Image (tube, grey):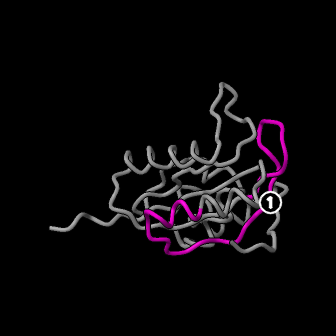
Amino acid sequence: MSPAINQAVLLLGSNIAPLQNLPAILQALRTVYTLRSKSDVYESLPVGGEGGHYLNLAVEIECADTYAILRDHLKEIETSLGRIRSEDRNAPRTADIDIILFNHRIMDQKLLEMAFISIPVAQLYPDLIVPTPENNLASLASRLARSTWLHKVDISF
């Protein structure tokens, strides 16, 4: 019996040398997982902290990992790329990888609040039903986009 294949949507981000670190994150993911799709790259201001602007994109992967194993492996990738964890949860970082959806279930509620998450994820799953008045992720992302500084960057990794 082969292992179950799970789908996960990850948000990748960096505000320390993002033009080098985001491709490194993608390469690390490709060595272990099947990359199914990716969003455009978006630039945003750091939330609640100092540092340069973030570059973010969403990717959909297939994996045989459970949620917990995937989460632990993503932390290992972050650490291997120089991520230093401190008491400051908003400190600048070389690599930030968050599991936003796992098997189409929302795993990070910030998806419903933050444009820098909802907009790239909506490119991959525009019709995802969300528990908001907008009812789908594309409509929610459109509303959130009007209330924050965020723009698409013409970069492809």
Res. 123 image quadrant: bottom right
In the figure, 92 relative to 116: above or below? above
Q: Is residue 67 magenta?
A: no
**Total numbered circles:** 1
Left/right placement of residue 64 relative to residue 90 reads left
Q: 28 or 122: nearer the eye?
A: 28
Residue 6 image point, x, y percent? 36, 63
- Quarter that holds the C terminus: bottom right
Q: Is residue 52 magenta?
A: yes
Left/right placement of residue 74 relative to residue 3 reads right
Q: Which residues are magenta?
A: 26-55
In the figure, 131 relative to 48: above or below? below
Residue 48 image point, x, y percent? 77, 36
Q: 68 or 29: nearer the eye?
A: 29
**Helix, strand or loop at disc 1?**
strand
Residue 44 image point, x, y percent? 80, 55
Dot 1: within a 10 Å radius of its alpha carbon, few (fewer than 14), some, or many (20 or more) residues? some
Residue 15 image point, x, y percent? 77, 49
Determine which residue is flagged by label 1.
43
Q: Residue at x 32, y 66 (%)?
A: 5
Q: 90 or 83: nearer the eye?
A: 83
Q: Residue furthest top?
A: 87
Left/right placement of residue 127 relative to residue 56 reads left
Q: Amino acid at mark 1?
A: Glu
- Quarter that holds the N terminus: bottom left
Q: Residue at x 20, y 68 (%)?
A: 2
Q: 72 or 32: nearer the eye?
A: 32
Left/right placement of residue 30 relative to residue 116 reads left
